[in-house]
Image (cartoon, coloured by chain):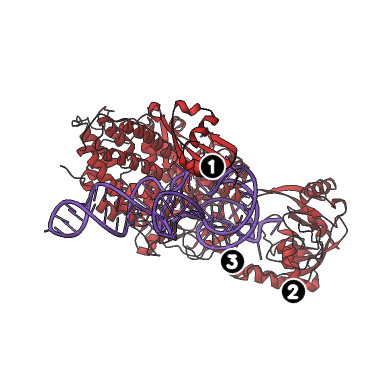
Amino acid sequence: MKKYQPKEIENKWQKKWKEEKLYSPDIDKSQNPYYALMMFPYPSAEGLHVGNMYPFTGTDIFARFKRMQGFDVLEPIGLDGFGIHSENYALKVNQHPMDLSKITEKRFYEQLTEIGDAYDWTRTVETYKPEYYKWTQWLFLQMYKKGLAYKKAAEVNWCPSCKTVLADEQVIAGVCERCGSKVEKKNLEQWFFKITDYADRLLDNLDWIDWTDKVKIAQRNWIGKKTGINISYKIEESNEEVTVFTTRPDTNFGTTFIVLAPEHQLVKKITKKENLEEVDKYIKTSLSKSDEERMAEGRTKTGVFTGAYAINNLNGKRLPIWVSDFVLGGFGTGAVVGVPGHDIRDFEFAKQFGLEIIRVVVGKDGDKSEITEAKQVQEEEGTMVNSQFLDGLDIHEATQKIMDYLEEKTWGERVTTYHLRDWLISRQRYWGPPIPIIYCDECGTVPVSEKDLPVELPFVENFRPTGTGKAPLASVEEFYNVKCPNCGGPAKRETDVSDTFLDSAWYFLRYPNTELEDKAFDEARIKKWLPVDMYIGGAEHSVLHLLYSRFVTMVLKDLGFLDFEEPFEHFKAHGLIISEGAKMSKSKGNVINPDKYIKEYGADTLRMYLMFMGPFSEGGDFRDAAIGGLYRFLTRVWDLILNTPEAKETENELKTLNKTIKKVGEDISELHFNTAISSLMKLLNILSSQKSASKETKKKFMLLLAPFAPHITEELWDMLNSRQQQPIRPEGSRPRRLVSGSIHQQSWPTVNEKYLEEEEISVIVQVNGRVREQLTINNEQLTMKKEDLVKLALESQKVKKFVDGKEIKKTIYVQGKVLNLVVSD
RNA sequence: GCUGGUGUGGUGGAAUGGUAUACACGUUGGACUUAAAAUCCAAUGGUCUUAGACCUUGUGGGUUCGAGUCCCACCACCAGCACCA
């Protein structure tokens, strides 16, 4: 009797699958394409931990299921090895990223092989290889041609530790997404992509794409579309006007002051002589404040009076103009109206400096008194007061009415603003694709010609970031000194590299096209394989990768390269596997290595354990306490298939089997792997308790288990069918689909509806909503009248006991489910 | 502060408004064994001495014949955003 020894069988099949190219669909000839993709990973040389393994495994189960459903599944893999992440690690271990990437790649692919994922190993993508980043640079050029890539000087986020600028999306609560350092502001000239041009489309499409809701919500919030109005005020003793942006013009009769951002260009023009010194001092200190200092200040308001006044057109009220850094230069018009009665920040500011507070809204608490405390500040709801023609209106009605009024008087203009900013893509680092731009004194900014791509990243011994605002490539003369492609005169290359998120913003287009050298992608292949049918990944990329990819896809559509504008019509976010209550990280020392579990129990057990732990969309805390249970399950499966006598199938067996086929299929489709596994366990329990199973049942059980535990099922399938040796195929030919071939090329079993019907139905009998009895009725009795059923129920002593001596007031019957008798007390 | 989400046995978790605690782990008892491991069988939410009854899905209300599920309020935790006007 052969024992279940995972180690022996797993390596054997992994090798065989790879040799036979079992999971490589014919890209050009596939009739029924299905593209299943797990979000592009950026592994480090340290290897994957079980938290990393988790989403790969779930995606693989789903993809294997789709393959068995008859699709030609493309399930590719690759890695994003460029970027700060990999470079910082290289710095830490003091190795060159170019050398390190080779180690990382090897280790990563080995680990994914060991876990048994069904990747198409013939078409991998690695972002740091010139044959890939050539096309990343090509993408930059397309952006440039379309006028969507531009260079400007701006206040940008600077990470002092990574020594590079960062995109807004990469600054999390004021710290660098990668290293956690406090981010500073720096004024630098940088390349941007005009993602804001696509804000509305990025927002509107969210209505129809099938994505995990919380990710859609995060994108909506990030795009942050708001409609409001720009109102202009005349400034006393001046020809200037100040324009403010507000979403709450309804409260405009409550305006008592105006505040400008320190960098607002009007500040210098309107400040009175006697206030000039103080204002200058304030601006200097506030602009030199680091984000850290500003955060430390919290909500405490600082500010300074300019001495100037604006006039409110509505009521002629004089509004003192202040300067404060709670107003952001980069949002709206960089100026706000101060309505301290109905905006908490304005209230704090007014309190700080003793400015007037006027109530113009009464909330539902009915408080009409003077506003002296923060808790009286009404922001969300209420009725207008002290506002002339707005009095008595609900604030939302008032908002529309006054907007109409202000526009009619030409004192204001409705506008839409966004939280989304343009995507800053320059990085002053080494490990990325050089931005393909040349600067010529004569011709100005000249894009590198497409035929000259790639602009290869040279091997630079000292790749350390400089911290000067210039990239390491800026000290490599042989790199940056070039001839202008236009005039032939001396010119210099751009020495910044692009953001690694650009590498990953289009990789899904490359997978079906990896061997093409003369184009990024082939039109026919794109038509066949894209958009991605199922995309699975982490919710942490809601506003990074997922937003950028959508933007890039839209641009490529507008340029005529694609015929769709949403790359991922179905996106499901997976949960996170944490450890000891925290995300796994080397620094916390809570990383769990999968290798030891694979060694001890095998990959199949680990796969199943990870999936059984809880819902895939939730993740969970990894404790290995229960992993033995899954190993036991697989051992019992082994025993069932090989050592349990075959017999004619029983009625019960067929019923459970068909129920399980239905349940497992539905569950995998919805990524409910944990419940799919539990129903497989139930099936096993029934088969082992009856101590026999038919050959057909055994086979179907194997098929259902195959996506979860691909090795053991392949081995058992092989034994069940006493498969003959595969004929030796000519070099490079594709494996034929053989009837007795791999289990992973078989069809998913179909449900026989006949066995889903129950001929005995149990109806529960409740008295006053409490369960008292369970009646078993047959199929014909299902349609019996309520009255008859009540009679039947009353025959039961258990029911009688609770009904006797009481009046039955009401009966409710839900067919085949529940009968509730309502009796008086 | 804002926006989402979560809260169920000793543990991970399951439950289209209709038998709460499926499945698994753990624990206890038993079988096998000289013994242990492995395996198999049984029990396993709580209270009351048992038949049986009552209680139980974070807390408090509500809707309903019937609520873990729907509504309101609150508490706790998690995630994302945040001086965005």
- Nearer to us of marks 3 and 1 is 1
Q: Amino acid at mark 2?
A: Glu
Quadrant occupied by the N terminus of chain A? top left
Subunit ID for the residue under disc 1: A
Instruction: Give the residue number, with chain letter if any, for mark 3.
Output: A291
Q: Are marks 2 and 1 on the same chain?
A: yes
* Residue nearest the viewer, comparing A378 with A731: A378
Q: CA distance from mark 3 to mark 1?
A: 73 Å
Residue at left 29%, top 28%?
A737
Q: Is residue A167 visible?
A: no
Q: Are marks 3 and 2 on the same chain?
A: yes
The answer to whether A818 is drawn above or below residue A301 in the figure is: above
Q: Position of residue A645 (x, y in %)?
A: 20, 35
Q: Position of residue A689 (x, y in %)?
A: 27, 40
Q: Which mark is residue A277?
A: 2
Subunit ID for the residue under disc 3: A
Q: Is residue A656 visible?
A: yes
Question: Relative to residue A390, is residue A300 drawn left or right?
Answer: left
Q: Disc 3 on helix, strand or loop?
A: helix
Task: Give the colour of chain A.
Answer: red
* Residue nearest the viewer, comparing A527 with A825: A825
Q: Earlier in the sequence, mark 2 or mark 1?
A: 2
Q: Earlier in the sequence, mark 3 or mark 1?
A: 3
Q: CA distance from mark 2 to mark 1?
A: 90 Å
- Nearer to us of marks 3 and 2 is 3
- Nearer to us of marks 2 and 1 is 1
Subunit ID for the residue under disc 2: A
Task: Give the colour of chain B.
Answer: purple
